[in-house]
Amino acid sequence: PPASPASLSSPPFFFPSINNNPAPPVRPPFLSCFCPTMKCAAVATLALAASASAFVPASTPFGVSRDLCLNAKHVEKKATKKHADRRPKKSRRSDRIRKPVEYPAVENRPPEYTVSDAPAVLASKPE
């Protein structure tokens, strides 16, 4: 059967009616002038400023620098003591009676390795 004119004028049930659309959301007045691109740029600028301020040293009153803080008069050498305690010791007899290693003399040494008894000569700048 042919479709009636009333059924042609009304849209099918799955299309929303134009009259039933809710009103567009109302933006707060401070956001009404920003578009999404400007919002993104503003957020990126704020994030950059916040991260950059983390690397700025804290200011102190009267310009006094507090970079160095020594609270002890006599610093204890704790790490040095520990390393000295734990270093390898000559505990075996073969370690104690071992003679030092003799290295062979280097032949054909370059001239800068020559040793002389003359006083040292300071090099001057070429002019």
Image: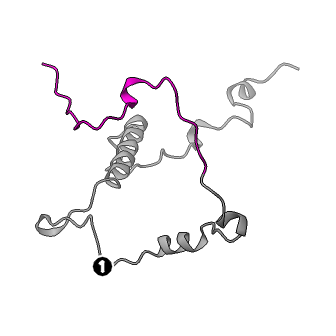
Residue 24: in magenta span: no
Q: Which residue is mark 1?
A: 71
What is the span of residues highlighted in magenta in the rendered image? Answer: 101-127
How would you rate the neighbour count of disc 1 (Cα within 10 Å): few for under 14, some for 14-19, many for 20 or more?
few
Q: 76 or 72: which is nearer to us?
A: 76
Which quadrant would residue 119 be assigned to in this image? top left
Amino acid type of the residue tagged 1 in the rendering: Asn
Q: Residue at x 30, y 79 (%)?
A: 71
Give the side of residue 74 with respect to residue 80, left or right: left
Location of residue 17 in the rendering, given as x and y in whole percent from the top left corner: 63, 37
Task: Tell me which corner region of the image, top left, top right, bottom left or bottom right, holds residue 86.
Answer: bottom right
The residue at 59%/67% (across/down) is 87
Residue drawn 69% across and 34% down?
Answer: 15
Indicate whether 9 appears above or below 95: above
Find residue 100 and report its image quarter. Answer: bottom right
Q: Position of residue 8 (x, y in %)?
A: 72, 24
